[in-house]
Amino acid sequence: MLKDLNKKVVESQAWKSIFRHSYEDTPRNRVLQVMSNVFLHLHPAKIRRHGVRMRFTWCMGGITFLMFLVTVVTGVVLMFYYRPVGEYAYADMKYLQFDMPFGMLMRNMHRWAAHAMVITVWLHMFRVFMTGSYKPPREFNWVVGVLLLVFTLLLSFTGYLLPWDQLSMWAVTVGTNMARATPLFGHEGPFADYVGVNARFDARSLLLGGSLVGPPALLRFYVLHCIVIPLVAGTLMILHFWRIRKDGGISGPL
């Protein structure tokens, strides 16, 4: 019975969308392992004609990745001059703007590239949906893309607090208040009584490190924005690019 269940899982469409072939040690699979290596073969052996037409792809995926690279480079520069401490954060931000050579340029490049990344990732998802590029065998990569969309929005949200001004503090206050209604993990959300969460120990307090937007929240958002989320997003991007190549290139379903 367990063998039959395993066979049904392996032969299901969901399994085949994730794993393209078996792992039996055969000459064919050895060739497939080499051809599937993203470092040895970044681009597929062949692509469809419409896959290189800008009016079909809009180049939104590539532009989104470019904006991510701009935010990473400018963000590393800004990290040299910024301290995620409530006492210094706002002053450091002002120093970046008015005293650091090219500081205003670096900060504005980082800010506008982040805004552009949010816009282009939505346009990319819209293009993929309208052209049917999420259909089999690309459904697994569509899920990866949705996760990348979520992490892009989280990057934008966590970075909003770092200037440590009134606008950012109250915006994050409103945003984190919504976490109170998270199912299971928010003390005002559904099923909170079954889990035992309360106002001191729920999703909002986990984000803020307390009950109010203060220095602990600034430090947590800084770590999430500069380390945790970029590492997860970068890993998902590698997987996303690899699956694009492995699924036969960009654009429409096979």
Image (tube, helix red, strand yellow):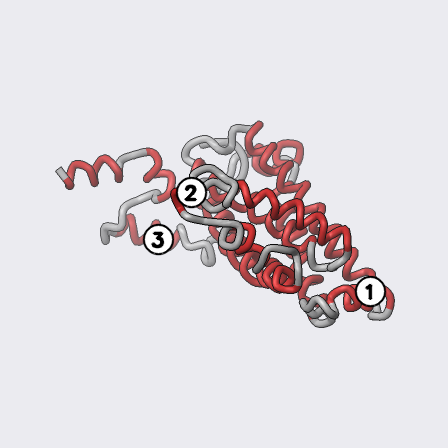
- Residue 43 visible somewhere in the drawing: no
CB of mark 1 within 8 Å of CB of mark 2? Answer: no
Q: Report the side of 157 relative to 24 (left or right).
A: right
Q: Report the side of 239 relative to 154 (left or right).
A: left
- Is label 1 or label 3 in front? 1
Mark 3 highlights which residue? 33
Above or below residue 25? Residue 9 is above
Q: At x 66% / y 45%, what residue is drawn? A: 174
Give the crowd class for mark 1: few <14, some 14-19, many >=20 residues within 10 Å: some
Q: At x 77% / y 61%, what residue is drawn? A: 106
Residue at mark 1 to residue at mark 2: CA–CA distance: 45 Å
Image quadrant where one finds the N terminus: top left
Q: Nearer the viewer, residue 216 or 11?
A: 216
Mark 1 highlights which residue? 94
Give the crowd class for mark 3: few <14, some 14-19, many >=20 residues within 10 Å: few
Q: At x 61% / y 36%, what residue is drawn? A: 57
Looking at the rendered structure, the kind of residue marked 2 is: Asp
Looking at the rendered structure, the kind of residue marked 1 is: Lys
Q: Nearer the viewer, residue 251 or 70?
A: 70
- Residue 134 visible somewhere in the drawing: yes
Could you tell me residue 151's position as x and y percent? 56, 49
